[in-house]
């Protein structure tokens, strides 16, 4: 009897760096898997978006496995669709659709091209935190039951109608309450207000910017280096014109209230508006204009 042993080697991040008899998986700077093995004879390559969500997984050996997976997400980052296609022809093999109650999947519908549609409903209770979704739903799944398609459509349609009516009524009541409250809070526009375009800027202004492939962004007509590891990411820039400082904070989808400080920079406030867009004076962009206009000799 022959025994085959597979040995896995990991690094400090618990990522596989070597597998016996197979090519080593590769990862991007965020730790997302780029290449690996799906079976003994076929590997795969993955593509990810800026929020570390997998978009596609494509086999490398179509003769062994001809199945490409594509994923779609909603505005909250939840996977709402998973489509399996033929990697060689692009024909759809199977479609999966997901409906959520916040972060818990309450319904999954599978629609294969060569079979009947199947639907499964999930019932959730308290998760490991002892509350509903306090631990992201981990350990909270109570039952999973397959039901008839027509029954699912009827139940979901009725539930959505009831919930939509309740949400609409709540929005109308909230709007009416805000309008009624604002009547006594609004103040008349000051009569002595005067616009002074030549007055120096003061206080704090907040900008939202996205870094480029080098971790830089443009604000106030200049390009600033934020973080080489924060590429194609959103950044909240707090510009304090009084103290002449800029604070760059990272914006993260998974934890929007946690915005760590990436870098603080000082700048010199311009008393006059600058003409054109100039590069930050660093080793990479010294002397180069960002608006592609030629410099005078």
Image (tube, rainbow, N blue to C red):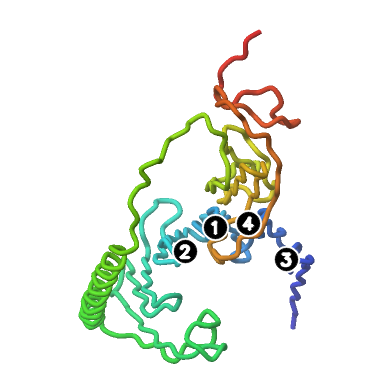
Circle 1 packing at 10 Å, graded few (<14), some (14-19), many (20+), is some
90 over 244 or under it: above or below: below
Tell me residue 117's x, y (percent). Answer: 29, 74
Q: Is there CB contact under 8 Å for labels 2 and 1? A: yes
Labelled disc at residue 77: 2
Residue 275 appears in which quarter of the rendering? top right
Q: Is residue 113 left or right of residue 134?
A: left
Circle 3 packing at 10 Å, graded few (<14), some (14-19), many (20+), is some
Ranked by sequence position, the earlier of labels 4 and 2 is 4
Labelled disc at residue 16: 3
Q: CA distance from mark 1 to mark 4?
A: 18 Å
297 over 177 or under it: above or below: above
In this view, the residue in front, 256 or 145, is: 256
Q: Is there CB contact under 8 Å for labels 4 and 2? A: no
Circle 2 sits in a helix, a strand or a loop, which is it? loop
Q: CA distance from mark 4 to mark 2?
A: 23 Å
Circle 3 sits in a helix, a strand or a loop, which is it? strand
179 over 63 or under it: above or below: below
| Residue named by callout 4 | 35
Tell me residue 98's x, y (percent). Answer: 38, 72
Q: Nearer the viewer, mark 1 or mark 4?
A: 1
Q: Is residue 126 left or right of residue 220?
A: left
């Amino acid at each position: 009897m022959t025994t085959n042993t597979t040995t896995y080697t990991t690094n400090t991040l618990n990522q596989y760096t070597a597998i016996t008899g197979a090519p080593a998986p590769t990862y991007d700077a965020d730790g997302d898997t780029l290449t690996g093995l799906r079976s003994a004879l076929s590997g795969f390559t993955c593509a990810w978006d800026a929020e570390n969500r997998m978009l596609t997984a494509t086999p490398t050996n179509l003769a062994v496995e001809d199945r490409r997976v594509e994923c779609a997400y909603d505005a909250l980052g939840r996977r709402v669709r998973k489509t399996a296609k033929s990697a060689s022809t692009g024909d759809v093999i199977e479609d999966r659709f997901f409906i959520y109650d916040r972060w818990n999947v309450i319904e999954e519908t599978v629609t294969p091209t060569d079979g009947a549609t199947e639907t499964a409903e999930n019932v959730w209770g308290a998760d490991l935190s002892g509350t509903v979704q306090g631990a992201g739903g981990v350990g909270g799944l109570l039952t999973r039951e397959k039901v008839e398609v027509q029954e699912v459509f009827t139940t979901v349609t009725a539930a959505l109608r009831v919930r939509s009516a309740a949400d609409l009524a709540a929005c109308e009541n909230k709007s009416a309450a805000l309008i009624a409250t604002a009547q006594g809070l609004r103040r008349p526009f000051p009569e002595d207000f005067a616009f002074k375009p030549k007055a120096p800027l003061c206080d704090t202004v907040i900008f939202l910017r996205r870094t480029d492939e080098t971790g830089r962004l443009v604000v106030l007509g200049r390009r600033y280096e934020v973080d080489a590891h924060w590429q194609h990411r959103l950044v909240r820039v707090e510009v304090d014109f009084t103290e002449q400082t800029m604070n760059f904070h990272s914006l993260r989808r998974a934890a929007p209230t946690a915005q760590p400080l990436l870098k603080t920079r000082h700048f010199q406030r311009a008393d006059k508006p600058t003409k054109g867009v100039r590069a930050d004076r660093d080793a990479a962009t010294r002397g180069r204009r960002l608006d592609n206009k030629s410099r005078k000799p």
